[in-house]
Amino acid sequence: MAFEIGIIGGSGLYDMADLQDRQDVTLTTPFGPPSDAYVTGTLRGRRVAFLPRHGVGHRILPSEINFRANIYGFKMLGVERILSASAVGSLREDLKPLDIVIPDQFFDRTRGRISTFFGNGLAAHVGFAHPVCGEVGRVVLAAARDDGATVHGGGTYVCMEGPQFSTLAESRAYRAMGMDVIGMTNLQEAKLAREAEICYATIALVTDYDCWHPGHDSVSVEMIVANLTQNAAAARRIIAESVSRMPAARGCTCGQALATAIITRPDLIPAQVRKDLAPIIGKYVKES
């Protein structure tokens, strides 16, 4: 059975308590194992699959996450939309700890992470000017507002390498560049989701002011966890309400992202690549 919506839980959000008919699904992908088993079931009448980004018990660093396997696994399960929850630091005075941001842009400050399914004889270049699905983003924003959260629509998420937090110089530079929030994980998810023709949106949970703020000149795990604990219940409610409000059919263009992106001549695509990427490219390139 296909699952309509995928949920990626970040720091502090390791489970969806309201998930009914739960079943763990362990998948093997051509890119290795995902972060953990997918917890599948029903949420507000919709079939969903939940994955803890850092694994159960939070044992995987941001740089160690197998992003390709995670997104490929969702594709194997038939997921067409992904809601991602993530802890972030704020780079703006008005984005306060415990606020929620629904970013619509990303800025890459990672180093050497693999963020494409392509290569090894198959070249493709998807459009990524608008990295967040507008349709899904609007649904999540409305759900958050109706839940009573202090939520901000739009903004740029800086994706840094980590696992260390920013230096003061870096934090000040990102503010000067006009960035809004900072985290360590979501960019690769967004890129791979686009290649897999899956809609993607981030629910960014503000935990701190990074280190630029005079009253928060140091970021600590204790501070982040304390604020995440308060935000976790709201995040679960917003995700559940977003799932229930999601249109049955997609009205965006995310599902056609590869239609004009594959540039390699079909007869030159290696057979193993065709086989490995069949769930992603199968409707455009048939196995020989």
Image: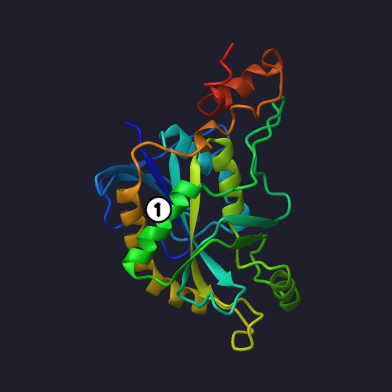
Residue at 47 percent across and 35 percent down: it is 75
Q: Quadrant of the C terminus?
A: top right
Q: Position of residue 80 (x, y in %)?
A: 43, 38
Report x, y in % for residue 9: 44, 56
Identify which residue, 199 or 50, lies in the foreground: 199
- Residue labelled with disc 1: 139
Which residue sits at x=64%, y=64%?
163
Q: Would you identify the image quadrant in which residue 160 lies?
A: bottom right
Would you say residue 215 is visible in this rendering?
yes
Near-viewer residue (284 or 117): 284
Q: Quadrant of residue 21?
A: top left
* Quarter of the N terminus within the rendering: top left
Counting labels gives 1
Q: Residues within 10 Å of mark 1 (few under 14, many from 20)?
A: many
Q: Is residue 256 left or right of residue 175?
A: left
Q: Quadrant of residue 173?
A: bottom right
Q: Which residue is found at the position 59% from the left and 30% from the top?
A: 258
Q: Is residue 141 left or right of residue 177?
A: left
Q: Position of residue 40 (x, y in %)?
A: 33, 43
Does residue 14 appear anywhere in the picture? no
- Determine whether the residue tagged by mark 1 lies in a helix, strand or loop: helix
Q: Residue at x 49, y 52 (%)?
A: 201
- In the image, residue 149 sits, relative to residue 83, either above or below, namely below
User: From this viewpoint, which residue is outermost toward the bottom?
Assistant: 215
For the rendered model, the colour scheme is rainbow
Query: How far across and how far down the image is residue 117, in percent?
Result: 62, 35
User: What kind of residue is marked 1?
Assistant: Val
